[in-house]
Image (spheres, helix red, strand yellow):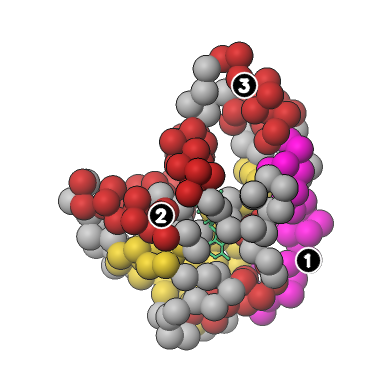
Amino acid sequence: MVLADIAAPYSSVESFIYDRVIAPAVLAMGERIAGELADQISDDARVLDVGCGGGHLALEIAARRPGSKITGLDLAHEQVARAASRASERGLAVRFVQGSALDLPFESGSFDVVTSVASIKHWPDQAAGLRECVRVLAPGGRLVVFEADRGCRLSDAQAFVERWALPRPLRLPALAAFRTWVAGQSIDLDDARELVGGLSLLRTEVRRVPGTPALVLAGSKPA
Ligand SMILES: C[S@@+](CC[C@H](N)C(=O)[O-])C[C@H]1O[C@@H](n2cnc3c(N)ncnc32)[C@H](O)[C@@H]1O
């Protein structure tokens, strides 16, 4: 179970709950995230979303940047199937692949942008997963990772949980669960700085995303 062991694979039930209850809130909060990402993605970019879940963000990017070539990868077969069926419902040509962040099934240098949202806290070895992300980046390519912030403000966590598709009486326990088991088992700014510092990247960025309980970790692979 993911709440008890953050590095355990999602079960079918956890995938389903995440997809229906939380992912829409990530995407809503992700208006900011998708906007920040879209700004960094040229029209013909090759983009990889690692830990893409049900494909919400990958499809949003595909809709905003129709010329780009987007690939989503996730460890959970159910999420990959869900993402692929969403893509076909929306008529978007996005490729979804099952695999692990720790052993990406792609040639080195094959993407212009590698992103990941709310996934690295689950990776059994975050540094190794991030090195894999950098390996598959082309020279000059950009890594942009978002993750829940263990040190997030209560008001930012509240604003996020308010958007979960839950009846109002369940929001308080959901907030406690989010702060304790999700953000509480995630990284903080110091961890993020250490992770980014261990990668050979230029133009690095590690900061909170204002108004959200998230951090962004970014950098460019030397050309
Ligand atoms: C909290 S969900 C985020 C999903 C999506 N990025 C979003 O924002 O809606 C975390 C996702 O990371 C995936 N994941 C966990 N460990 C992984 C790994 N080692 N490699 C690839 N994906 C992984 C899970 O299966 C899950 O779909």
**What residue sits 59% from the left and 31% below the top?**
160
Q: Is residue 17 above or below residue 113?
A: above
Tell which residue pokes out farthest to the right in this image.
190
The amino acid pointed to by label 2 is Glu
Q: Amino acid at mark 3?
A: Arg
SS class, disc 3: helix
Of label 1 and label 2, which has the lower sequence position?
Answer: 2
**Image coordinates for residue 140, horizontal then vertical, percent:** 49, 77
Q: Callout 2: 10 Å neighbours few (<14), some, many (20+)? A: some
Q: Which residues are magenta?
A: 179-207
Question: In the rendered image, which residue does mark 2 sit on?
Answer: 78
The Cα atoms of the two marked residues, 1 and 2, are separated by 33 Å
Give the x, y percent position of residue 96: 35, 63
**Image: 7 above or below 101:** above
Q: Please indicate, yes or no, whether residue 196 appears anywhere in the rendered image.
A: no
Query: Which-is-in-front pick, marks 2 and 3?
Result: 2
Residue 189, visible in the rendered structure: yes
**Residue in the image at 46% along x and 52% along y:** 53
Q: CA distance from mark 3 to mark 1?
A: 33 Å
- Count neighbours of disc 1 (C-alpha within 10 A) and say few if under 14, some if 14 to 19, many if 20 or more: few
Q: Which mark is residue 194?
A: 1
Q: Residue furthest left?
A: 91
N-term-proximal mark, 2 vs 3: 2
Query: Up-down: is 186 above or below 135?
Result: above
Where disc 2 sits, the SS reads helix
Find disc 3 in the rendering and name its residue.
Answer: 171
The reply to whether the residue tagged 1 has its Cβ within 8 angstroms of ligand 1 is no
The residue at 47%/85% (across/down) is: 108
Taking the spot 66% from the left edge, 75% from the top edge, the residue there is 128
Which amino acid lies under the numbered mark 1 shown in the image of this protein? Glu
